[in-house]
Image: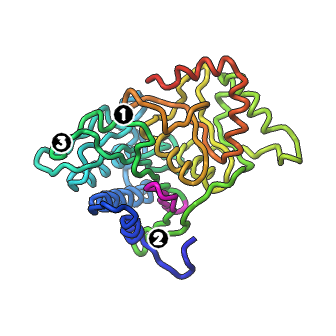
């Protein structure tokens, strides 16, 4: 935790983190500061959403066949505008866009790529439930630093992320992020226009008493998953069961609670959706990096998420993440299910 009475802004924190990297040039720090500006703007519009014509859908569908909401479009365009001209990126990709989002020809190209979900939990917008922005940053792999990036720069395994984080727009706006040196949380003070450090070096509890899963899908679960959830509901004072079920339906909010209080978040593959629902590049990888950096575990049901090798930009992946003891226990049930094991061999294939 920050020292009582201290005011550590995110800009100061980013600058301090830069000193941990011997060959830092400042470009990465400026990239993060541009992204923070976009998040501030989105936070402002989320707060004003009921006062302006920003609720509801546009009448269009995104690349996943989902209805596009007005605040989705605004958030997506805000991040693109904030990041496109900074000279730090060679390309971007958004959950709301089909392919690579190019950097204009007359703008300098940088050494990084940005992937983002501009507004996770879109279906909850109109009922004033917590929503968020998720982001993931990689170094470019294409050799020509002066040219636009390509799909090889975007489609990289999660262990290559150099930063990941999310903003939550709830009772307050909080930003949680990592650059590979632990996880820190900042809370936005609208009177100052600043994100202030509110929780440093977050560590997820070894075990927690909460589980988060969409039980509306229980009819489609494989036997191992069904047995595990039944196990969590059994009465056993020695192991503090039954666990408490918590499910918001916004992945970033459910993972945030798991990160802070411990327990387990699950969006598994099942008989209806073998690859789950969440997008590997925009949701699963950045959330998994944060969980691991806080001392937790993130798997796709059996394998470490960050080791998965993506094949397409918008593929999906199951996610089971949280406190180490909880995930280990879940894995013991999943591994007993031969049907689930057979399905897991195909889970890394694109949807």
Depth check: 321 or 335 in front?
Answer: 335
Depth check: 276 or 307 in front?
Answer: 307
Numbered disc in front, either 2 or 1: 2
Q: State how far apart marks 1 and 3 are (Cα).
A: 40 Å
In x, y percent, where is residue 287? 51, 45
Report the residue at 35% width, 34% height from top: 155
Depth check: 124 or 157 in front?
Answer: 157
Label 2: few (<14), some or many (≥20) within 10 Å? many
Q: Is residue 256 magenta?
A: no
Quarter location, residue 247:
top right
Magenta-drawn segment? 171-184
Q: Quadrant of the N terminus?
A: bottom right
In x, y percent, where is residue 39? 38, 57
Label 1 sits on a secondary structure element that is strand
Q: Is residue 182 magenta?
A: yes
In x, y percent, where is residue 336? 73, 24
In the rendered image, which residue does mark 2 sit on?
196
In x, y percent, where is residue 246? 68, 45
Q: Quadrant of the C terminus?
A: top left
Q: Earlier in the sequence, mark 1 or mark 3?
A: 1
Q: Using the image, tell me which numbered label, if any, was put on residue 59.
A: 1
Q: State how far apart marks 3 and 2 are (Cα).
A: 37 Å
Q: Earlier in the sequence, mark 2 or mark 1?
A: 1
Please state if 104 lies on the left or on the right of 93 as rendered.
left
Label 3 sits on a secondary structure element that is loop
State the scheme by which the image is colored: rainbow
What is the number of callouts on the image? 3
Q: Earlier in the sequence, mark 3 or mark 2?
A: 3
């Amino acid at each position: 935790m920050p020292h009582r009475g201290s005011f550590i802004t995110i800009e100061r924190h980013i600058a301090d983190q830069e000193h941990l990297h011997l060959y830092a040039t400042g470009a990465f720090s400026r990239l993060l500061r541009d992204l923070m500006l976009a998040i501030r703007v989105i936070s402002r519009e989320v707060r004003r959403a009921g006062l302006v014509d920003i609720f509801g859908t546009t009448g269009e569908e995104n690349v996943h066949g989902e209805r596009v909401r007005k605040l989705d479009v605004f958030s997506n365009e805000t991040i693109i505008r904030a990041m496109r001209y900074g000279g730090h990126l060679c390309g971007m990709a958004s959950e709301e866009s089909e392919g690579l989002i190019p950097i204009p020809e007359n703008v300098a190209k940088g050494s990084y790529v940005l992937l983002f979900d501009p507004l996770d939990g879109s279906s909850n917008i109109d009922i004033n439930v917590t929503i968020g922005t998720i982001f993931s940053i990689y170094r470019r792999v294409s050799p020509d630093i002066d040219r636009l990036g390509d799909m090889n720069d975007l489609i990289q395994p999660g262990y290559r992320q150099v930063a990941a984080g999310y903003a939550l727009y709830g009772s307050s706006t909080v930003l949680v992020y990592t650059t590979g040196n632990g996880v820190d949380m900042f809370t936005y003070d609208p009177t100052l226009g600043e994100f202030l450090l509110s929780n440093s070096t977050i560590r997820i509890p070894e075990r927690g008493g909460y589980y988060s899963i969409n039980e509306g899908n229980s009819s489609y679960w494989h036997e191992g998953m069904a047995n595990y959830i039944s196990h969590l509901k059994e009465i056993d004072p020695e192991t503090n069961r039954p666990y408490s079920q918590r499910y918001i339906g916004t992945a970033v909010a459910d993972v945030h609670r798991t990160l802070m209080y411990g327990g387990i978040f699950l969006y598994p593959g099942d008989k209806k959706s073998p690859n789950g629902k969440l997008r590997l590049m925009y949701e699963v990888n950045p959330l998994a990096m944060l969980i691991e950096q806080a001392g937790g575990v993130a798997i796709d049901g059996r394998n470490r998420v960050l080791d998965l090798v993506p094949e397409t930009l918008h593929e999906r992946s199951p996610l089971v993440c949280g406190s180490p003891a909880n995930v280990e226990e879940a894995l013991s049930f999943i591994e007993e299910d031969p049907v689930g094991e057979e399905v897991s061999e195909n889970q890394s294939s694109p949807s």
